[in-house]
Image (spheres, helix red, strand yellow):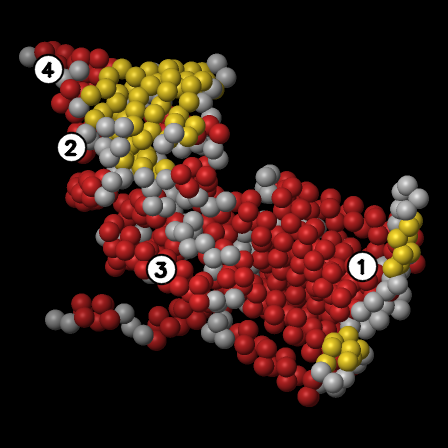
Amino acid sequence: MTAILSVEHVGMRFGGLTAISDLHFHVREGEILSLIGPNGAGKTTAFNIMTGFLKPTQGRVVFRGRDLAQTRPNEIARLGLARTFQRTSVFADDTVRDNVLIGLHRFACPDFMDRLLPTPRARAAEKAARARADEIIDLVGLAQRAEEKAGALSYGEQRLIGFALALATAPRMLLLDEPVSGMNASETQGFVRLVRKVRDEGVSILLVEHDMPMVMEVSDRIVCLNYGRLIAEGSPAEIRSDPAVIEAYLGKSAARLEHKEMADA
Amino acid sequence: MTRLLAPTLLVVLAALPLVLKDPYLVNALIITGIFTICAMSLNLLLGFTGQLSLGHVAFFGIGAYVSALTALGFDVGLPFGLRVTYEGGSPLVGFGLAIVVTGLAGYLIGRLSFRVRGAYFVIVTISFAEVVRLVALNWVELTQGPLALTSIPNMTLPLPGLGEVALRTKIQNYYLVLAVATLSYLVIARLVGSRLGRAMRGLKENESLALSLGINATRTLTIAATVSAAMAGAAGSLYAHYIRIIDPDVFLFSYTVTMVIMVVAGGKGTLAGPLVGGLLFGLLPVALRPVMAPEAQWIVYGAILIAILFVMPKGIVPALEALTRRRVARAEPNPALEAGAQP
């Protein structure tokens, strides 16, 4: 399978602090790849580099043949790479439908006169945008709340709006930054189904997430970071049994637990 | 209720001259109308994109000078021994040129300053207004400087069968201002209701999210700045041909402050806000004039502004909207609650 996104020997230094050193991996067309690692491992930094919000101090990120360092964030969305944010990120004062309509911005591109006058073309574009918005809202399961202000919805629902906004840009690839944090178990299950459905429609997905059961369930492959370095790469089963991962990430608490059990005995 | 505010206002204002004959009051309404157009244009930037332009009067003044000079003509020397002489022409052409030139100025300011937003935009716009004022004051050959441009002809309208008719009376100018204000309102309503308006709201509420969705911030804000400036320029042109004398004082900072007060008190980010704020603060001096000295008027003016913002921090129109929503909610009991209450 061909790579849709390649992270090529990327390094990121903030002054004297090395957040990422020599990160190198690929996301393949149509797969769900998860990026895991303990707090401070450099996941969010890597994420921001991949979406063009940060420029790497070394190496490059290539999305469908284009170097993202030369591309501004709003152009990256046009290339078909969409992201969600770690913190809840919605247009709080707008309704759910208007949120998605803002997300559909780059479609329906009437020219300036169409903006000023309600020409047939502008009306048709507006109608198509509204229909598409309703489809997306339906897909994420927020049809009941379409007319409510986004800021008034629950935390888990706001995360779904963030996901719907990213979908509205018709991406080829989605970068999800801790999408299920703040969701309860059943909301998480619903989200896993949603991510699978979107992937089945041909969208590649890169997931950064702390919820290990969710990561193990949904991922095709997993990449594990620690101290800004890649320490393991493979299928969920491989990662689960990788000694470097167990030691650096899952292992710490597991080792402590074993130690405690021995002391208790 | 606020949705019907603008059409109702239009009907009332259109009928007003039938009962109102006092030329002083008609004059006050014309000036108020011109400043309300400025307030509407400022609201497009301040209310809908969240960018505060504290040099908005620059576009008003440029519009006034461009229009006046187009009508009067000029004869100026330029560097390298060049001379530009222009005979003067139709004020209507001046009106068009004022819109084009201020639109261009707005576009340039937008391109320059929207790379650095927020406080920097405020500083750039203030500086721009001050530079333009100093040019108007010191380029005496073109602008007459402090001696003012005088005898500016009245606005003309080409009417079928009558040729170009000069609008000399107050009532004619009143309807001209009302027409331009209505048109401005419709253009703004159309823009903010469209895809562009959604992009502006998105940028105002959450810029990084908007960027991640592929919204081009510079382009969106530049369009808003261009339209906003062109509208203020049109208002400046109306002012020049109505007052018929302009001097560099048309660039006074206090005019910008007046526009900001109209927008903020009326309710920024609402279509009807600048209309309400504009009429209120435009006509307040008229109402206060018979009862107190000018110095005391300014104190009352400030006190009323503070009182409005204290009681209605978002402005008059949003407060009215909230009030009607609450009343509607009380009038129609929630059906879900009713059903739940049954045994």
Residue B17, compared with residue B250, is above or below; it is below
Q: Amino acid at mark 2?
A: Glu
Callout 4: residue from which chain? Answer: A
At label 1, which amino acid type do we have?
A: Tyr
- Element under disc 4: helix
Q: Are marks 4 and 2 in contact (CB under 8 Å)?
A: no
Q: Position of residue B315 (x, y in %)?
A: 55, 61
Q: How many marks?
A: 4
Which residue is most to the left?
Answer: A265
Location of residue A221 by image quarter: top left
Front: mark 3 or 2: 3
Dot 3 falls on which chain? A
Label 2 sits on residue: A217
What's the amino acid at mark 3?
Answer: Ala
The image shows residue A74, relative to residue A47, as above or below, that is below
Asked if marks 4 and 1 fall on the same chain, the answer is: no
Q: x, y percentage for residue B80?
A: 90, 41
Q: Nearer the viewer, mark 4 or mark 1?
A: 1
Kindly report the distance in space between the C-alpha atoms of the residues bearing marks 3 and 2: 36 Å
- Element type where label 2 sits in the image: helix
Query: Label 3's element?
Result: helix
Which label's residue is closer to the chain start, 3 or 2? 3
Left or right of B131 on screen, residue A246:
left
Residue A146 locus on image (x, y percent): 31, 58
* Residue B65 numbered tag: 1
Where residue A261 is drawn, which disc sits there? 4
Q: Residue at x 58, y 57 (%)?
A: B44
**In the rendered structure, which disc, 4 or 3, sits on the residue that comes first in sequence?**
3
For the residues beneath circles 1 and 3, the answer to whether they share a chain is no
For disc 3, the marked residue is A128
